[in-house]
Amino acid sequence: MSGLTKLKAMEARSATGRGKQLLLFGVFITLVLIGVVFFAAFQNARSTRIALEEDVRSRQQSQVESRTFAMNSWINQTVDQAKHFANSELIQLFASEVDKMDNIPLLFDTSKSDSADDDDQPSSRLPLMRTQLVEFASYRNFESGRIVNSKGEVYLSTETGLPPLNETQMALVKKVVSTGKVTFGPITKNRNGLSLEMYLPVFPPMYEEQGGKPASIIIFSQIIGPVLNSFLQQDMTEKDRWFSLVQRSGNGYQTIMLEGLQIKPVTNLGELDANLVFTMRQSSISEELVYSSGMRLSSIDWWVVAEEKASRITHASQEHARTVYILAGLVSLALVLMISATWWWLIGREQGNINAQFKELLVVIENQKKLLDGINNTMDDPISFTDSKGVYRYVNKAFAQVVGREEDDVNGLDTAAVLGFDTAKRLNLSDQHVLMTGEPTQVQDVLWLQSKRYIFQITKSPMRDSQTRTPQGVVSVYRDITQLVETQEKSRRVVQQTIDALVGTIEQADPFLGGHSRIMGSIASLMARQLRLPDPNVATIEAAANLSQIGKMFVPREILLKPGMLTPEEKAEMELHVEHSRQVLKNIEFELPVVDAIYQLNERLDGKGYPQKLQADQISIDARVLAVANAFAAMARPRAYRPALPVHEVLGILESQKGAYDQEVVAALTAVLETPAGQKVVEQAALTKAV
């Protein structure tokens, strides 16, 4: 019995020892897990603050860029309006004559008013010039205008009297005289509000492009408080965010405070050569700390600055950190209870049953995982699941292969780490749309993976919570359509090559028709874009214009070039060119209504065109644009029996024929001809050899 007792004692001691070891192991695991939980809480709090700061930076960048673009556009438009006045021949000639005068007071001497040469003197034109200046300043909403000679002497003003320039204004005048460029003064405050002065050079006639110095300088003053307020206004519900304008003043900087119309020196921004980098700093309008960033305007030393109270981010991150650490404490307490219960179960009588249940559960989970993996891995299309933060939680084998990673390596990474920052930025926009709306969406994007170009059609669907039904993540299915898109692009290239070949045939057979096609194509393309037509319409118009004359190759040349009126028989023969064009082009697959546009080219709104006598809206917009372009090209080019018609005569003819041509299209032509590109087309047409 002693041996049996010793054996039981040994078993008891062994069991007791195993129990103590299990207890120590449980305590160790508990401490490690608690440490992991609090470390994860710390990392989460830190990443949340970084994310909040990044959100502020991204929002400020977008808002500052949009406002900077708008202000640049406004400044350029204002300069262009003022230049129109400064570059007028009347102002240039008068300024040149005044610049030659040694004594400005002689300009105001009326003692020689009875002289025979009185009308040729600058003083006789002084009232007219002042009227011109006053009317232009009033029309363009300038507060005042002054014209000074190159020495800074005022000889013309919209104000009563001729107020002299101060030192700052004299310095800016000298700068314009030396550089010949438009210059802006600093924003100042006067009785009417915030004012900005613009200094424009007035060159002698025919000397501006030859490097001549300005004969005079025009100073326009404008009240810009309302304009700045429209650009820098903020949402009244966001009182912790605002925008301000910083300007360079001498060797320092000033902030323009629209509220109260104040101009305040700024000393905490350092030297601003370019943009203001995003960081936490003292506000430009108060003593508090803010997150701020800014962007410099392209044509003036102004910076648009966006600011947001740092306390907002600090309070939000602190509140989040407090919540995270409370949750970490609760999780740690739950872990202690769970591990204690587990220890109790491990030494309890039901341990075997619990182990069996867990085993059965693991088998079920494993079988379900194998089934899901088997289905997904047999699919050729890449599939991924990302949570609401854009982190991959599942990818199938096809996705892992296309990105060149193992499946387990992808899980836990965000989209930027797997596909690159720029691609992630584009895809995350559609992910956010799915999460916010709960509706599936489909996008097409180009991805470079393992140095290979893919074009994917990506279908994105929300993964909903089983209870709340709110989207918790996004399931993305990538369909590779690279070959399909490349085939379509190849088809378009073949059609373009066919068009080029036909255009070449026209030019070789009849250079005059080829030249007409080129002029017509250039002006029609510009008109289509001026009308803001969709890209397919622009492409249709360009192709149709280039091929519009192909049918005329089959018309007898003596009819085509006849200067006088055609006989009814000749006219019928001429009108057959549209049928010839359709016969030549009908078997080419343009994928656009090119042939229809050419066939309707000679239709007129009043139904007097040919070949179908279509009216008004029965004629496509493409054909209406081509009709005006065709008429312009015909009249703007010289012929053997007449020179090229001036542009204003061509426009007058088109505007007078309201029953034939779409006047909205004619207005677009008028606008195009005022642009450099349109003027270049006119020059090319005028230089064409007459036939």
Image (cartoon, rainbow, N blue to C red):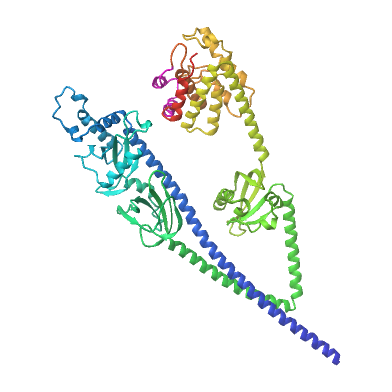
| Closer to the camera in the image, 681 or 44 | 681
Residue 417 at x, y = what percent?
Answer: 61, 54
Q: Is residue 92 left or right of residue 444?
A: left
Q: In this view, does 650 lie to the left or right of 122?
A: right
6 in the magenta segment: no
Residue 27 at x, y = what percent?
Answer: 66, 78
Residue 299 visible, this orientation: yes
Secondary structure, magenta segment, majority class:
helix
Residue sitting farthest toward the bottom: 2
Q: Which residue is drawn at 73% across and 65% down?
A: 361
In the displayed structure, would residue 166 be above or below residue 326?
above
Residue 691 at x, y = what percent?
Answer: 50, 13
Q: Is residue 619 left or right of residue 20?
A: left
Q: Residue at x 15, y 30 (%)?
A: 110
Q: Residue at x 50, y 56 (%)?
A: 55
Quick one: quadrant of the N terminus?
bottom right
> In the rendered structure, which segment of residues is drawn in magenta?
644-672
In the displayed structure, would residue 264 be above or below residue 592?
below
Q: Is residue 113 left or right of residue 342?
A: left
